[in-house]
Amino acid sequence: MIVFEGVVKRYGATEALKGATFTVPKGVVAGLLGPNGAGKTTTIKIAAGLLRRDGGRVSVLGLDPWEQGEELRERVGVLHERPAYPPDVPVKVLLRHLAKIRGLDWEDALRAARLAGVERYLDHTTSSLSRGYLQRLGLAIALLGEPELLLLDEPTANLDPSARREVLAAIKTLGEEMGATIVISSHIIPEMEQVCSYAVIINGGVALAQGSLTDLATALGAEVEFVARSREPRRLASLLISEEGVRSVEVEGDRVVARAGSRVRQRVEALLEEARARGLAASWDVRSRSLGEVYEKVVQASR
């Protein structure tokens, strides 16, 4: 889906990307994570074909973003960090106009508005929208034409907590309903844990680590979380807590949530699979306990 190999980008004497190498597979919600100045926005712009790299190779949807940018942008939606909209224009007028430019009709624009959660505000002007709903409008614009890939650059930056929750809820819905690949750049790590299934951690213009959150947690020794459903949750909880290395178990209705060190992941997985085969667990899944813990371990190791 996205491949960066040894990508270099310079702004005068400053090297924003220093041989960045990473991949983002199809169908994930990926966090492009790093502190301010890490090279995240430069990466997003290069991937969208809006900025020319100085070295290395880039492939997005099988295309070179700079050489085949026009073709690529027909299949990619982008939300920039600080989008600007004409003031006092009704949302529906703006969406209709932008859809027409892309050769789309009003039904396409309406579907994008529904997906982004701005359908109730179609008659409102852009200047009357809250910061959170301005970002939702940006999502709607990025969704025009139902792109295969969404690139979202710091979508919650400079928003108050309520607006950040609104935008994250919209992104989470998109990830569940669209099936598109979504890349979100951010330095606010705890928020990304709510929506991401994959991460690329970047700092100083270099990609330090990449992979699913669970695989990263396992590789770095971070805590992992197991979630199972059972008709006998307390019995399953007792079985899990007796396993060495399981640190805690909670029962939430028919859900059993166990947390363990990554070194015992395979043993706990085998235990849960055995419980499923015996009918004690209806289903189970494993995920990273803390993206923040993974992030800190990666950054500390690079110092």
Image: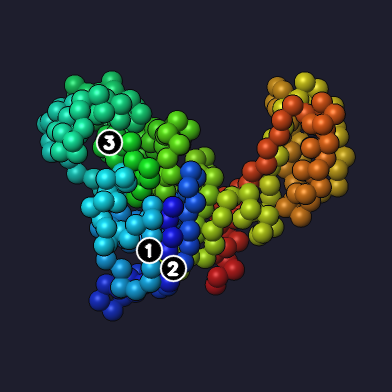
Name the secondary structure under disc 3: loop
Residue at point 48%, 47% (across, down): 26
Q: Amino acid at mark 2?
A: Glu
Residue at point 77%, 43% (across, down): 269
- Give the x, y percent position of residue 205: 41, 68
Relative height, residue 7 to residue 75 (above, below): below
Task: State the residue position of label 3.
Answer: 144
Work out whether mark 2 precedes mark 1 in sequence or the reverse, and give the earlier one.
2
Q: Is residue 101 left or right of residue 204?
A: left
Question: The C terminus is located in which quarter?
Answer: bottom right
Q: Amino acid at mark 3?
A: Leu
Residue in front for this viewpoint, 296 or 57: 57
Extreme residue in the bottom direction: 13
- Give the x, y percent position of residue 279: 82, 26
Task: State the residue position of label 2.
Answer: 5
Quarter-wise, where is residue 107 in the image?
top left
Relative height, residue 71 to residue 8 (above, below): above
Task: State the residue position of label 1.
Answer: 58
Q: Could you tell me if the residues under marks 2 and 1 are in contact, i.e. CB atoms within 8 Å? A: yes
Q: Could you tell me if the residues under marks 3 and 1 are in contact, i.e. CB atoms within 8 Å? A: no
- Give the x, y percent position of residue 86: 13, 38
- Give the x, y percent position of residue 174: 42, 34
Colour mapping used in the image: rainbow
Name the secondary structure under disc 1: strand
Residue in front for this viewpoint, 159 or 259: 259
Name the secondary structure under disc 2: strand
- Packing grade of label 3 (10 A; few <14, some 14-19, many >=20) is many
Residue at point 12%, 31% (across, down): 88
Separation (CA) of disc 2 from disc 3? 30 Å
Separation (CA) of disc 2 from disc 1? 6 Å
